[in-house]
Amino acid sequence: MRGNNGCVVGICGAVLVLVSSGAWSGPVDERLVIDDEIEMTTRTQSADGHPLPEVISGWHFRTESTRALEADSFQNPGMLEVEQGEQLWNTVEGSVGKSCASCHDDAAQSMVNVGARYPKWDEITGKPINVELRINRCRVDNMGAEAYPFDKGGQKPLTAYIKHQSLGEPVKVNLAEGDMQQWWDKGQELYYSRTGQLNLSCASCHEKNNGKYIRADHLSQGNVNGFPTYRLKQGKLISLHNRFRGCIRDTRAEFPAAFSDDLMALEVYTTWRSEGLSVETPAVRQ
Amino acid sequence: MINVKRRTLLTRTAGLATAAFFGQQSAFASVDEVTAAIDAFTKGVTPDSGVITLTTPEIAENGNSVPIAVSVDSPMTEDDHVVSVMLLAEDNPNPEIATFHFTPHSGQASASTRMRLAQTQNVVAVAKMSSGAFHSASNNIKVTIGGCGG
Amino acid sequence: MASKPRIKVPKKAAVGDIITIKSLISHKMESGQRKDKEGNVIPRKIINAFSCEFNGKPVFSCDLDPAISANPYFEFKALVSEAGTFKFSWTDDDGEVIEATKDIAVA
């Protein structure tokens, strides 16, 4: 079926060509069952107030061979880093002589459904906190270890290991805590704000044009339930804030720092948009 | 995964002939290298078609990781087995991908891996049999270019 | 911290069965084709060979070139003739050899 060659309002000429040259082919009608065991919710009716009628995992927008890679946890190369995260969980670091396991024991028990509920409200900083920053809090306050710099040290493997303990659990964010609703508002504003020389917002691609092609790339809804996600392009795990920055950079805009207020607000908002989808960490994407 | 229609080496040699005829070697930059690699592997014997099943996706959404599976019909006995299968990418900077080695202890001459493809191109598999015969098969894989970031 | 290679071998099989073996190892497979920010070629560093033996007999091996993806994956077959041990090895360009073993019982 040939695509809708209609105008994407407000997108500059160059990008208009890119988006309109693609054909609509939509998400595939398949089910993701990991290792023929874990049934994943990859499509779900959206909550009241959600701008899309159905929330669909990025898995549905990928080709058959990429989808197959995620469905087999042995072949999924992201699992190598998850296993590295497990080693880190059990490794003593810092002046206090503790590992994560010293307090939290077996993550397979203690971390079930934990990663699925982040970001959360943090009373100490008066801001939302995500898994990466929560790990750093523990390292500094309880282990006497140094905080991991963004994407460095064990940050990605450990975050992926913790989120992987929620594999198959639905993403849920509690907006009733603290000022989470205000951060959601700020995140929503950013999501719809056009930026960069290409004058694109998140919504330009992921809300208005998901299912279409931008060059040969099949645009997804931009859901966040699979992060950190294994990207074939880089051949390693990619964190959510790295992906945010990459997307914003591609609009040819200045991009905010990881864990900045802007990106934390965007994490709160996009996590809310992804609610109901199973945690897929580590998802496999192109 | 789609088992793309098998092609024989004829396609490739036809391409070589065309390139030579039109003087377009630049578009087939590694054809000479591919031919040389196959000749070195077969010691100049021309491979036959058949017996190889080469399985690759029709479209790869990222050239950094493209699945490839090869399976060769053979009884895999001491007297009659597949010795090795060489995989080549016609339009990569270097054509060699990998060479699989089998023995009667393999039970079946069947293996898969993941490869890097620089662009849309043909991938060739050449099998060496214990009898001294050679077979080849080839698939075309379209490698797509990503979105705004490339 | 490097992760251990991942290997999948059935725990048990009947004599005469042909089993499927899968292996995955963490490695960047630096192709030697890339350049760093200063424009210098990043030297090639790949796993250049992989092999699997069963009770000392070769089952499957592979010569790898830089066109093999990061985190090399192999899936292949083995004929089960007796109980024993599969030995796997990966050879890095720098000479390092990573080894692992898996046992199989016969039913």
Image (cartoon, helix red, strand yellow):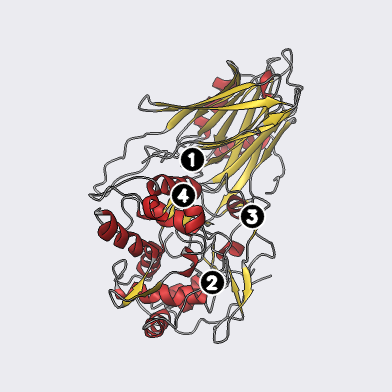
Q: Up-down: is B40 above or below B29?
A: above
Q: Which residue is mark 2?
A: A221
Reading the chain from its start, which is encountered first: label 4 or label 2? Answer: 4
Evaluate whether label 1 is on the same chain as label 4: no
Reading the chain from its start, which is encountered first: label 4 or label 3? Answer: 3
Evaluate whether label 4 is on the same chain as label 2: yes
What crowding class fits label 2: few (fewer than 14 Cα within 10 Å), some (14-19), or many (20 or more)?
Answer: many
Tell me residue B103's x, y (percent).
65, 19
In the image, what residue type sits under mark 3? Glu
Q: Determine whether label 1 and label 2 are within 8 Å by CB.
A: no
Helix, strand or loop at disc 3?
helix
Confirm whether residue A148 shows in the render: no
Tell me residue A270's x, y (percent).
46, 74
Q: Which residue is mark 1?
A: B92
Task: Give the position of the N terminus of chain A as an image quadrant.
Answer: bottom right
In the image, what residue type sits under mark 2? Gln
Closer mark to the observer between disc 1 and disc 2: 2
What crowding class fits label 1: few (fewer than 14 Cα within 10 Å), some (14-19), or many (20 or more)?
Answer: many
Tell me residue A259's x, y (percent).
31, 68
Q: Up-down: is A230 above or below A219?
A: above
Closer mark to the observer between disc 4 and disc 3: 4
Gap in Å between the C-alphas at discs 1 and 4? 32 Å
Q: Which residue is mark 3?
A: A64
Give me the chain letter of mark 3. Answer: A
Q: Which residue is mark 4?
A: A82
Front-most of residues C77 and B89: C77
Extreme residue in the top direction: B79
